Image (tube, grey):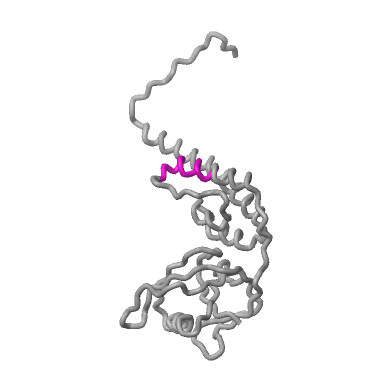
Amino acid sequence: MLPLFPLQTVVYPGERLPLHIFEERYQQLINDCENDGISFGVPTYINNKLDYGTEVKLQKVSKKYEKGESDVVCVGTRIFRIKNFFKRFPGKLYAGGDVEFLTDNDSTAEELQEELLKNIAILYVELTIENPPSFDIPFISYQVAHKIGLALHQEYHLLTLRSELERLNYLIGHLKITIPVVREMNRAKEVIQMNGHFRNFDPLDFENFKL
């Protein structure tokens, strides 16, 4: 059984997760992580249910407060699916569950990575993001997933995919939809900003015009 800390967020393997711990049950969980070296799971609470999540390990306690609160940093490790959920881990305040750790097909394709990075660069240009993050090949899809404007349900869907090729194609597909939308929004913004200003239109040539 794995201790569980459900959140309305998606955590990916390898991701650094800072948390402010204030509830008594999770103060107990962090103390158990410190004292016993246990890990815990962060299942994503979405659509009023818990299903997929990521196991995380406590990396460090950054700060402790007088009333028992703390700031901690955890790191994602393995993806799991919940088989049985229990509101209370035996003898504890926090929740727990029987989970199945999922295997993954991690074979990838450099050309898909290159295409994904190319589309990310285009998105950042369209969004005029200063000092955008840079990524080097090889990388894994989880490293960029939080950086391209996915909604929570899209991040969660990515978590459920068991093939790196599927994940890369999914992210590329998202960007191919998102980039034209951003461009159209930028065009609409320019039109709105031009409203009321004198505009210089190119003259139309009617020499070959026919009804």
Residue at horizontal 45 percent and vertical 36 percent from the top = 187
Above or below, 19 against 131 in this view is below
Q: Nearer the viewer, residue 60 or 211?
A: 60
- Whether residue 191 sits left or right of residue 105 in the image: it is left
Observer-nearest of 37 and 23:
37
What segment carries the magenta color? 119-129
Residue 38 shown left or right of residue 67 in the figure: right
Assign the magenta stretch its main secondary structure: helix
Residue 102 in the image, given as x and y percentages of width and height: 66, 69
Residue lying at 48% horizontally and 84% vertically, measured from the top left: 32
Residue lying at the far bottom in this picture: please name it.
91
Q: Quadrant of the C terminus?
A: top right
Judge by depth and name the residue closer to the eye, 86 or 41.
41
> Quadrant of the image for the N terminus?
bottom right
Pinpoint residue 127: horizontal percent, then vertical percent. 44, 43
Residue at the farthest left position: 66
Measured along the vertical axis of the image, is residue 62 above or below residue 159? below
Rendered residue at 67%/63% (across/down)? 104
Q: Residue at x 37, y 32 (%)?
A: 195
Q: Position of residue 197 (x, y in %)?
A: 33, 28
Q: Quadrant of residue 176?
A: top right
* Rendered position, 131 above or below 156: above
How many marks overall?
A: 0
- How far across and down, in percent of the image, does residue 12 sit? 55, 63
Q: Is residue 120 magenta?
A: yes
Q: Quadrant of residue 128?
A: top left
| 59 part of magenta stretch | no
